[in-house]
Each structure stands twice: as structure tokens, then as C-alpha cells.
Amino acid sequence: MKIKFYSDPGHGWGAVKRKVLVELGILEKITPFSYQKGQTVYLEGDCDLATLTTTLALRGETIEYIHKYTDSRSSIRSYSNFTV
């Protein structure tokens, strides 16, 4: 699975479609520390992204990260907090 990983000087987020979280059965495990915009969920880089990566690893799936960095405040911080 390819995951775009966005980061700014303070934090990082892995972007995945909401339907992926539903299909993996982990939607309810995602915290409000992640963000969402439309059907994309930006998983906070510590706990929530680890939930996804652990789930994928248990299924034998590999992850390829595509890194996107900004040296200013990421616009992701202005998105809505994640809700189920």
C-alpha cells in the first residue's frame, strides 16, 4: 500500500481513504487527534498511523511512504478532527 506522509516541523500524518479504515476494521480505533477532509483521513503519525501499519503488517502487506514535507505550518492542522 502507498501512503502519502505529510509533515511539518512539528508533526506528521499519513493520508488514507476512509474506506480503507472501514475495510480493515479499524475505523473505530482512530482517535480525534487525526484529521479528515472529504473522504481522506490524515492519521496522526504516532498512535493512529501505527494502528494502520500494525494492521497491515499482520495481514502481510507492505507499505511504501511518499514523503511530503513543508517547513511551515501544514494546512492539515486546519482540517476537521476525525470523527467516526
Image (cartoon, grey):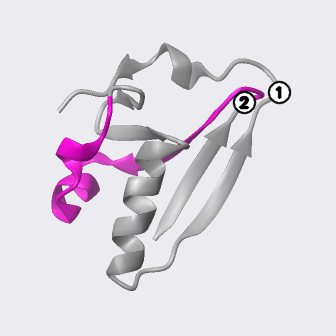
Write the residue at 41% across / 27% down. Answer: 33
- In the displayed structure, 74 sits above or below 84; it is above
Q: Earlier in the sequence, mark 2 or mark 1?
A: 2
Q: What is the count of numbered marks?
A: 2
Q: Return the mark for residue 71.
A: 1
Which residue is the site of mark 2? 8
**Quarter of the image containing the C terminus?**
top left
View extreme (right): residue: 71
Q: Amino acid at mark 2?
A: Asp
View extreme (bottom): residue: 60
- In the displayed structure, 55 sits above or below 25; it is below
View extreme (top): residue: 78
* Disc 2 to disc 1, C-alpha distance: 6 Å
Q: Position of residue 71 (x, y in %)?
A: 82, 27
Q: Alpha-carbon neighbours of circle 2 within 10 Å: few (<14), some, or many (≥20)?
A: some
Question: Mark 2–mark 1 contact, CB under 8 Å?
Answer: yes
Q: Position of residue 5 (x, y in %)?
A: 60, 49
Image position of 6 (left or right of 44): right
**Quarter of the image containing the N terminus?**
bottom left
Is residue 14 magenta-colored?
A: yes
Q: Which residues are magenta?
A: 8-31
- In the displayed structure, 43 sits above or below 23; it is above
Q: Return the mark for residue 33.
A: none
